[in-house]
Amino acid sequence: MSLLFNHARRHDLFDRNPISLVRQSAKRRTTPEVLTAAEIQQILQALTSVEHVAMLLDVSTGLRQSEPFALKWTDVDFETKQVSVTRSIVHQVVGPCKTEASQKPVPLHDHVVKVLQEWKCQTRYSAADDWVFASPFKDGQKPYWGPHIMRSKILPATRKLGITKRIGWHTFRHSYSTLLRVGGADIKVMQELLRHASARVTLDTYTQAVTPAKRTAQSSVMSLLFPDIKDQTPPPINQRAEATNLNS
């Protein structure tokens, strides 16, 4: 229901979302699934083309499920190695980010930067205003539909690997958060990397995290995912198994 009102707001049919005033239980209905570093490695190795790049970006940054496919090349700064999250996309409708805090820059690891640069050379849509994951089936006017990639590419790969966990795009964000904790990241750094609007009382006692600390915390996750990353250059995307058409 809330999504319907948000959609209506974007088209100026309502000036507010009344559902936002409804109090919800603070208790999570189910515990979110989390992938181990080994499982993430297995899945990434089984993926090719756009789904490999999208999952790598998501699991190495903790972007929300509405954010990766809303990125344009102008949002990616290869010089400073960071990505600016300025919009989200839900059901192929572009809108604002979830919160003001969501719009903070997100650091990119060197490995991810290389893969994104490679992807930019591979895709037909590499202009500044093009979608990072522009769909050729929509002549680049729209990005790939994330849920379709999940259903048609990522989930079949996990089943073949024998991974039975319930997986969605948000699983990668939860997994990233867990790996940050495993890597011993400072709580305030975690708050900023995950771009939470509020870290509650305990988190608010920590001082502002600095960029080097963020990169160190992120690197600890990447070292878990890719132990030999310093000596390993990712193979070109076009040398991986060619992906079948994505009808999105």
Image (cartoon, rainbow, N blue to C red):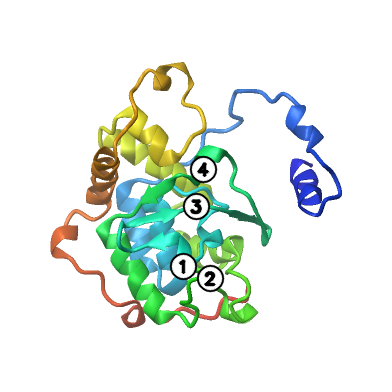
Who comes first in sequence, dot 2 or dot 1?
A: 1
Separation of disc 2 and disc 3 at Cα?
A: 14 Å
Label 2–label 3 contact, CB within 8 A = no
Who comes first in sequence, dot 2 or dot 3?
A: 3
Read off the residue under disc 4: 102
Question: Which is more foreground, mark 4 or mark 2?
Answer: 2
> What's the residue type where badge 2 is placed?
Asp
**Residue 69 visible within the image:** yes
Read off the residue under disc 2: 129
Label 4–label 3 contact, CB within 8 A = yes
Image height check: is 137 above or below 232?
below
Say which mark, if any, is on residue 17: none
Q: In terms of secondary structure, where does tag 3 sit?
A: loop
Image height check: is 146 above or below 238?
above
Circle 4 Cα neighbour tier, 10 Å, few/some/many (<14 / 14–19 / ≥20):
many
Q: Give the residue furthest to the right.
A: 13
> What's the residue type where badge 1 is placed?
Trp
Read off the residue under disc 1: 73
**Residue 161 visible within the image:** no
Q: Residue at x 55, y 66 (%)?
A: 149
> What's the residue type where badge 4 is placed?
Ser
Q: In terms of secondary structure, where does tag 1 sit?
A: helix
Separation of disc 4 and disc 3 at Cα?
A: 7 Å
Read off the residue under disc 3: 85
Label 2–label 1 contact, CB within 8 A = yes
